[in-house]
Amino acid sequence: MEPSRPHRPLTVDDIVRIASYQDREPSHEARVIAFAYHRLALDLSRHLGRDANNWYCFAVWASKTVSENLDLSEGSPFLAEAGRRLNVPNALRRPFRHVLLALLGPSYRLGLALANRAIFLEMGSLAADLWAGGPEYSVRVRESREAERPGGGAPAGEGAPAQARRPAFLTRLLSPADETLLDTVVEMFTRAKDEPDPALRAELVLGANVALVAYEQQRAQQALELVLYRPPRWLMRAPWHWLRGVLTGQAPHRLEVYLAPHASQPWPVRQAERWWAGFYTRHMMGMVTPIGRIRLGRPLPPPRRAATEPLWAPIRDADVRKLIEDYVPDPERAADGVTDWLDFDDRMRFIVAFFRTYLTVPELFAAPFVPPTADGLLADMDDGQVPEPFREWRQGQATRRRTRVPILRQLYRSPLRADPDADALARVDLAAFSDRRPLSP
């Protein structure tokens, strides 16, 4: 059911305002983003139809899953599901929660929330401006050149405090990605808009979905590693850094430990990281959908009323077929569960199989929340103002093609101080600098 308020297509200004709003509780923030994705999916359906689900239909339920995972309260559905899967007795559920909170640490919520918001900024801006009537572009989160200067901090005149730290965390949280994939997205969505054959149009939507999720998953890689590698590093590396800090009188920089590459870790730590990532994938990772929960570490279940053979029929469009083959080289094992969610190739194989299998499931267009909640989220989407630099940019006052302007200051201000890594995250000046990336005509 849709909210009672009338639908208004989202603009890039809306996306920026939602992404830059400060101080929402992380799980609620993810719900707002999930509902914004839903509105974007409906906006695109005006051009693409609803015979095939566009990427934003899937993003709705992924962000709703993130909102559940960010809720670590006593009644957390994520923790309840994890306890059920691991057969934790009811009498031990409370100690189990405390152990899991200690293992995951504040980095889990902060890293996941920041990545979810930043990816929404990039993916949402692309959809909002795709057919807005002007020169199309997407917004990218970039590190400022000023941040590379020794001592860090923004230059005078930008309103940053003199003691601001180098705003490198957000850039390091988002991995580099192949930006030509965005051109493929625009090309295939545009071709789909003008394609009269419903079957071919569905193929082109699928191709755009695959290109978009490949870009998004490349961007999310570092954030996923921060979230999943933190527990073994907290157990095996943080104590040594704490001891060294005691001996040297210098405060340990745990964030550097948690963001270090997996390959640079000692052999025992690498083994523990691989085991934990596999365990977490098999036993704790799932995704909410309107027709049931999917276990990411188990074989992908086909949706009810769906025949698998037509879904996996040969693809006629050569460009889409090439994209599918790049990520699913072996169709016979396409629907197998993921063994390690940090393995990009294995993760992409499963996601592409999910997209192809659920491409025509109409329930994915459904609103993710019932009207009273949806109305509240719709009101939350109107909170805040478009940051002034971005407003000037939209008015044409910034004339350079790739002007970097601050649009996300203090992307998330955490009240947590229980762990040094949370303290570091909260004190980092997360003034994110963005630039425009023109989309291919």
Image (cartoon, rainbow, N blue to C red):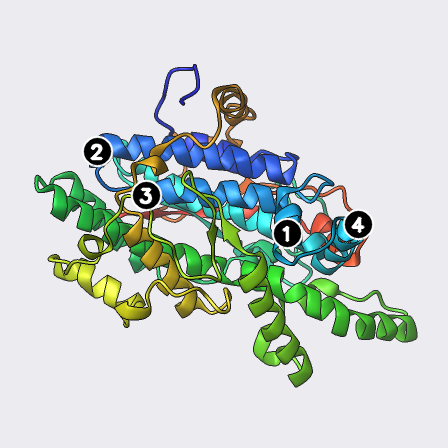
| Mark sitting earlier along the chain (1/4) | 1
Tell me where residue 249 sits by quadrant. Answer: bottom right
Give the position of the N terminus as an image quadrant: top left
| Percent coordinates x, y for residue 375 in the rendering | 50, 20
Q: What element does badge 4 sit on?
A: helix
Residue drawn at the location 53% of the way across and 57% of the way down: 145
The alpha-carbon separation of the residues under discs 2 and 4 comes to: 53 Å
Q: In the rendered image, which residue does mark 4 sit on?
A: 91
Instruction: Please identify, in this view, whether the residue under mark 2 or under mark 4 is nearer the observer.
Output: 4
| Percent coordinates x, y for residue 292 in the rendering | 44, 43
Q: In the rendered image, which residue does mark 3 sit on?
A: 137
> Which of the pair 277/299 is nearer the observer?
299
| Percent coordinates x, y for residue 215 in the rendering | 38, 57
Q: What element does badge 3 sit on?
A: strand
Residue drawn at the location 39% of the way across and 65% of the way down: 336
Q: In the rendered image, which residue does mark 2 sit on?
A: 47
| Mark sitting earlier along the chain (3/4) | 4
| Percent coordinates x, y for residue 135 in the rendering | 26, 38
Amino acid found under the numbered disc labelled 2? His
Amino acid found under the numbered disc labelled 3? Tyr
